[in-house]
Amino acid sequence: MTSARPQATLRPSTPLLVDPALFDPASVAPDTRAVNASIVKALGAIPDRWVFPMAVLRKLRLEGKGPFPLSPESPLAQVIEIDGPRGPIPLRILTPAAPPKGVYLHLHGGGWCLGSARENDGLNHRFVERTGFAVVSVDYRLAPELPYPAGPDDCEAAALWLVREGPGRFGTERFAIGGESAGANLAVATLLRLRDRHGLAPFRAASLNAGAYDLGLTPSARRWGDEPLVLNTRDINVFVGHYLREGGDIGTDDVSPLQADLTGLPPALFTIGTRDALLDDTLFMAPRWLSAGNPAELAVYPGGCHVFVGFPGSLADQALARIHAFIGTC
C-alpha cells in the first residue's frame, strides 16, 4: 500500500494581516482627532470651492491662499524641463548634499486637476533628509484643460527620462516610484506602461499612499457622503469627471489599475488611514498586488484622513518613518 504524500504546511502570509482594532474609533489618538476636526472646520467654511475654475484654485494654492498652509520652498530644489509628447515637462529635483543613494520619482496628488511639485516641497525635502535619495517630482499636465491621457503620458515620459539619464545625472540606478492619491494612481499607471509598452521594470519599490485605483468608485468612496475631511464623494466625482472629460474609459488599465494585470511589478508599501474616502481602494489593491506575485505591505493608520501624511501629528510621523525606511532599504 502506497503511503499518502505528506501535505505541505500552509502558513498564512503576514504582510497584509490587519488588526481589526485599527478600525475601532477608540484607537484614534487625540491629536489625530484634533487634526481631523480642524480640517473639517476649514473646508466646511468654504461655501462651494467648485464654483471656481481649477486654474484659479491652483493659483490660490501656490500663493498660499488655499485652505491649508503652503510649505516653505526647499533650498534643495531646482527645476529643469525635459521633452514630452505634448511639449516640455517641468521636473522639480531635490538633491542631497552627498551623492544620492537612489532616486525617487514622485507624482503629486490633487485629483489629476490640482496640486504641483512645488506644493510638496515640505514632504519631499524631509524625504531627501531621511533617506539620502534624490527626489524628482513631476509637474504633469492637469485636467480639465489637459485631461487623460495627458497626465499619464507626461509621467511615462519622466520615467523614461530617469531610466535614460538617471545613472549619469545621479550616479545610481537605484530607482523608486510613488505618490499620493491621484499620484499613486499615476505611479501604478506608469509602472504598467513601462512594463507593457517598453518591456522595462526599472523601479525597485513603490510607495503608494491613499491611491485612487478604481475610478468607477469603490464602496468607501461611493458611500462616504458630504463630510469635507479633505476628500468626499462629490470631490471624487468632480475630479474623475474632469480627468475623463474627453472619453477615457474607467475600465482602462492605466485609468483604473485595480482592474489591470499586476504581474511583474515591484514591492509596494500601501499606506492608508481609516478615515479616508479611498480606504477601500487600498484594501482592495494591496491583496491584488500580492496575489499577482509581487511583495506587498499594508500600513493602516487609525483615524488617518485622506493623505494624512501631509498634516502635522504623531500619525504622520509614524507613517513617514515607515515609508522612508521602506524606500531606504529597497
Image (cartoon, grey):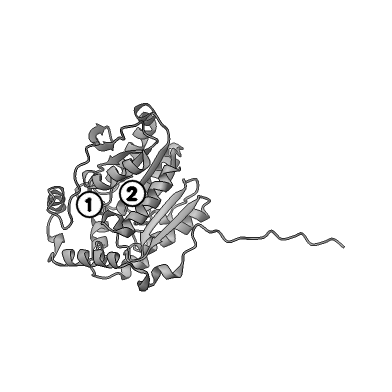
Considering the numbered disc 2 on the image, is that residue within a helix, a strand or a loop? strand
Who's the residue at 16% across and 60% down the image? Answer: 50
Front residue of 2/328: it is 328
SS label for mark 1: loop
Residue at image x 45%, y 37%? 200
First in sequence: mark 2 vs mark 1:
1
Q: Is residue 140 shown left or right of residue 131?
A: left
- Give the residue type that dot 1 points to: Cys
Q: Position of residue 126 (x, y in %)?
A: 30, 45
Q: Residues within 10 Å of mark 1 (few under 14, many from 20)?
A: many
In the picture of the structure, the residue carrying the numbered disc 1 is: 113
Q: Residue 156's image quarter?
A: top left
Q: Where residue 219 is drawn, which disc sits there? A: none
- Mark 2: few/some/many CA within 10 Å (<14, 14-19, 20+): many
Instruction: Please tell me in which quadrant of the rendered image residue 48 appears.
Output: bottom left
The location of residue 262, given as percent across then percent down, is 47, 50
- The x and y percentages for residue 192 are 42, 45
Residue that sits furthest to the right in the current view: 1
The quadrant in which residue 163 appears is top left
Looking at the image, which residue sits at the far top?
A: 168
Q: Which of 323 and 67 is in front in this view?
A: 323
Say which quadrant the N terminus sits in: bottom right
Residue beneath the point at 82% across and 61% down: 3
Q: Can residue 307 be seen in this view?
A: no
The quarter in which the C terminus is drawn is top left
Q: Name the residue under label 2.
A: 179
